Image (spheres, rainbow, N blue to C red):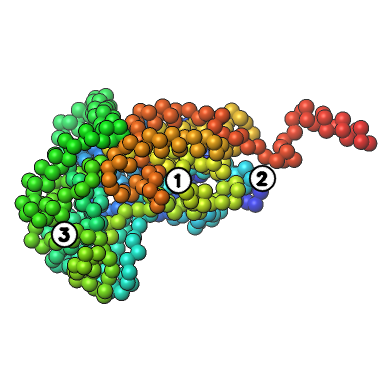
Amino acid sequence: MGTDERGHEHVRVAVIGSGFGGLGAAVRLRREGITDFVVLERAGTVGGTWRDNSYPGCACDVPSHLYSFSFAPNPDWPRTFSGQERIHEYLEHVADTFRLRPHIRFDSEVRQARWDAEKLWWEIETTSGTLTADVVVSATGPLSDPKVPEVPRLDSFTGKVFHSARWDHDYDLRGKRVAMIGTGASAIQIVPAIQREVGRLTLFQRTPPWVMPRADRAITKAERWLHRQLPFTTQARRGLLWGIRELQVQAFTKRPDELGLVENLAKANMHRAVKDPALRAKLTPDYRIGCKRILLSNTYYPALARPNVDVVASGLSEIRGNTLVAADGSEAEVDAIIFGTGFHVTDMPIADRVTGADGDTLMQSWKDGMKALRGATAAGFPNFMTIIGPNTGLGNSSMILMIESQLNYLADYMRQLDVLGGRVALNPRETAVTGWNNRVQDRMKRTVWNTGGCTSWYLDANGRNTTVWPGTTTEFRQATRHVDVGEYEVVRPPVAERPATSRTAKRTKKAEVKAA
């Protein structure tokens, strides 16, 4: 680490965020022999979304042995599907095991990042100071900034209001009348976790989700002992979980009609717990399973069938004092509102804080929809890479697989910069970005996410799916194994600032003599 000409700290790489993507990037940089980097974290601990989402019942819907780094296996996962606390502990463990803490700057939220075309570096303003970096890796993740809908007269509500990702643990829900807004992955975990303690729970459901049984169980001591003594068994378990999900991809991406059998299993799951035909009608989706994220729970439907729970099959329309009014006119008076309404996925706030070579922010560049070359780099933003960028999300497998593929791309990106030598930047060509995006969108046309008849958070304001990867994780790993420098413009400093070679110096000397 050094300083720039104004005395600001200068680093080779600045990583934004310390969730899975940020910590993974830090580990990979160290493995590449790069130690001149910092991790900028807005909070006081690592963990990203698994630190922020601490609501009751919070857990992962991907098996633990697959939802962890391949280079940091954990033989001691206590359950097949781990809860938030265990995953957060795992990320703390990764930070310690790979000696990342000296690189992490806590309480350092990035306010602005601007590309300096003359110096060929990024100037980054954070809440703890300013620094410059040759390369910026944005690992803020799509599930980092809560999204609260604009509800008319929300300010008139005198009770408690919070988002699931900003849970107020000091507020006592016991005996309260509570409204749960939304029926996504967070909501179906929260509802059964709080149903027994609240006085009354009203669920405002705009669209019912498809819910499959959750095959969760405790991992036995014998299994954990075996994984510790014979590490290859952990790898084998991970490989089996991965392989099963790879085989499922075809149904999501090419043959959505084959998902009818899965729908029947989901309906059977509902019928076992919900005996009331009227309630079942409210909870039955009218779109193809998989179009929206398939949710896993053994407790959601039983909780909805309890006497102290009301399901309003209509979205929240307005608020009149402490009375919530649904779009269908039904009303509910409540003491607290919990928004389980997701995140800014297709309009990530970090994009409004990053200014590229042309003076436009990344948000302005993406006004017609997010797009990035191989899900990582955007035209006009040299030496800027996104982990979990556009069209890298998954509908059926572990995002850690995609993150590790992007880490491969990051590692080769840094190698290419070293090969080119000197002060240099790579700026993705617009033609390369557009070509990649067109191919992805063309493949997207026949997927269940585009043809299943639903409106999901995978789609942006223009109705384009800029979130999900329409293929297998194997395909994505192949596509990101190496950086094709031909897809980039090689950017050098202005001629006057380039260090003179011996040949250039000789030509300059001759010119000076001749002029004299």
- Residue placed most toward the observer, 294 or 129: 294
The image position of residue 125, as x and y in percent, is: 54, 54
343 or 312: nearer the viewer = 312
Which residue has dot 2 on it? Answer: 118
For the point 47% across and 35% down, which residue is it? Answer: 436
Task: Mark 1 or mark 3: name the one nearer the start of the chain.
Answer: 3
Q: Mark 1, mark 2: which one is toward the viewer?
A: 1
Query: Label 3's element?
Result: strand
Q: Position of residue 505 (x, y in %)?
A: 80, 31
- Residue at 14 percent across and 61 percent down: it is 310
Give the number of the mark in front: 3 or 2: 3
Chain-order first, disc 3 or disc 2: 2
Residue sitting at the far right: 516
Task: Give the CA distance from mark 1 to mark 2.
Answer: 27 Å
- Secondary structure beneath label 2: loop
Identify residue for label 1: 370
Q: Secondary structure at mark 1?
A: loop
Mark-to-mark CA distance, 1 and 3: 35 Å
x%, y% of residue 440?
41, 36
- C-alpha gap between disc 3 and disc 2: 59 Å
Q: Name which residue type carries label 3.
A: Val
In-image side of 128 versus 8 (left or right)? left
Indicate the amino acid at tag 1: Met
Residue furthest to the left: 275
Q: Earlier in the sequence, mark 1 or mark 2?
A: 2
Asked if residue 68 can be seen in this view, the reply is no
Type of residue at label 2? Glu
Residue at x-position 25% and y-position 25%: 236
Image quadrant for the N terminus?
Answer: top right
Residue 311 badge: 3
Name the residue: 26% across, 28% down.
247
Q: Where is residue 325 shown, x and y percent of the image? A: 23, 68
